[in-house]
Amino acid sequence: MNRIATYAAAFGLAAAAAVGLSACGGSSSSSSSASSGSKPAATGDTVSLKSVSGVGAVLVDSKGFALYSPDQEKSGTVRCIGSCTAIWVPLTLSKGVSAPTASSSLMSKLGTVMRPDGKSQVTFDGKPLYRFSPDGSPGKVTGNGASDQFGGRSFTWHVVSSGKTQTTTMPTTTSSGY
């Protein structure tokens, strides 16, 4: 399946999921507290670094999936809501976990922001983190440079790193009326 068909299929799933999702947005302040009493994720740190061929060292979640952030979400503002979250899955803390975990080199840049649904989303340098559902498996970075639109809001997504990464521009734009 080519990349456009893959995104079209993902968009169809997002539109179907949007029917049951709320379309309210919000923002909250970010916090960078690192509580040593926090429970770590079952499979390791909430966030870690992984080298991905052709991209560089990128942030990944506890399962090894690349993490992204849109240019439009800064200083703890959450704009990806509703159908957007079917494609761009927010990295949230599990119930009972009060702070994200990571190696000491990343920990000082991690924090959380409250999403409109009441869940704590992990941030890096104040930017909310997301997993790109079409990546499909750990170690893939297919959403770097992607542009899309949900609910009249435009987004440009980049894989997150603690250093420089190579950007590959996505040829596809997706949108949703939700």
Image (cartoon, helix red, strand yellow):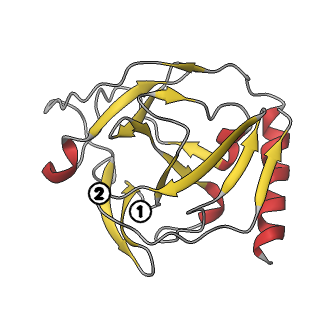
Q: Are marks 1 and 2 in contact (CB under 8 Å)?
A: no
Q: Residues within 10 Å of mark 1 (few under 14, many from 20)?
A: some
Instruction: Using residue 97 as the reference point, say whether residue 160 is left or right of it.
Output: right
Q: Position of residue 125 (x, y in %)?
A: 32, 40
Instruction: Using residue 130 as the reference point, say whether residue 36 is left or right of it.
Output: left
Q: Earlier in the sequence, mark 1 or mark 2?
A: 1
Q: Residues within 10 Å of mark 2 (few under 14, many from 20)?
A: some
State the quadrant of the N terminus: bottom right
Q: Position of residue 58 (x, y in %)?
A: 37, 63
State the quadrant of the C terminus: top right
What residue appears at the point 29 percent right and 62 percent down from the top-left corner? 163
Q: Which mark is residue 162?
A: 2
Above or below residue 91? Residue 65 is below
Residue type, numbered disc 2: Ser
Residue type, numbered disc 1: Gly
Residue 120 or residue 155, whichever sits in front: 155
Secondary structure under the numbered disc 1 in the rendered image: loop
Give the labeled residue for mark 1: 64
Q: Nearer the viewer, mark 1 or mark 2?
A: 2
Q: Position of residue 153 (x, y in %)?
A: 71, 35
What residue appears at the point 61 percent right and 50 percent down from the top-left corner? 156
